Image: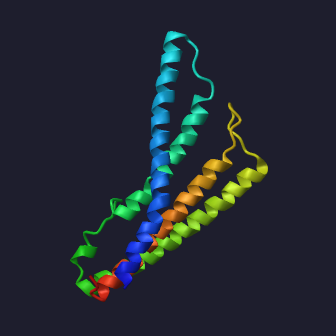
Amino acid sequence: MFTRAAKHMTKFISYPSSFLFGAAMVAMVFVMLIVSADVFMRYVFNSPIDGQWDLSTMAFAVIIWGPMTAAALKGSHIALTFLLDRFPRLPRLILQVVISLVTSGMLALVSWQLLQHAIHLDVTEFVSPTLRIPHAPVAYFAAFACFIMALAFLIKLPEAVGKFRKEQ
């Protein structure tokens, strides 16, 4: 029952996770192209692209926050489990539940703070220095990505409970 619920939750979270991952891939290609074009324009025509720094820094925020959820869902994020793996089965599963709850709670708190920051950026109309691009959409993106990542770690809870109950 718990294992099946975790599978359904994973499927539900996989859609926004795929969107975030795709946005990060597009942003990475964009950064490669804009930096290459800027270098070309700077050395061939002695005229760099105005606002390249603004665009690159905003794209890097998408590159950083985008794929984190996919890594959390696949379990490919960095985890130091060398000590946890040495524990017996029951204490290990209990610690996995505690770790899932603490991680989800901390990520939810970070998401909440990012959302408040995004609202503040939106209200104050904070923009980039050169191109005058608003920063709020990038902050909203980061808050959404962090929230989805909190849900991805929360999915580990029913998985651990299912293992504790020896569900298949």
Residue nearest the observer in this picture, 31 or 5 = 5
**Measured along the vertical axis of the image, is residue 104 above or below residue 48?**
below
Residue nearest the observer in this picture, 168 or 94 = 168
Left/right placement of residue 147 relative to residue 88 reads right
Q: Residue at x 77, y 53 (%)?
A: 123
Colour setting: rainbow
The quarter of the image holding the C terminus is: bottom left
Residue 146 rendering spot, x and y as whole percentages: 53, 61
Residue 20 rendering spot, x and y as whole percentages: 49, 53
The quarter of the image holding the N terminus is: bottom left
Residue 7 occupies quadrant: bottom left
Q: How many numbered discs, if any?
A: 0
Left/right placement of residue 88 relative to residue 1 reads left
Residue 90 occupies quadrant: bottom left
**Measured along the vertical axis of the image, is residue 32 above or below residue 69?**
above
Give the residue furthest to the top: 45
**Measured along the vertical axis of the image, is residue 64 above or below residue 12?**
above
Give the residue furthest to the right: 124
Q: Residue at x 62, y 29 (%)?
A: 51
Residue 126 rendering spot, x and y as whole percentages: 73, 45
Q: Residue at x 47, y 75 (%)?
A: 102
Residue 86 rendering spot, x and y as whole percentages: 21, 77
Residue 73 visible, this angle: yes
Residue nearest the observer in this picture, 70 or 18 = 18
Residue 95 visible, this angle: no
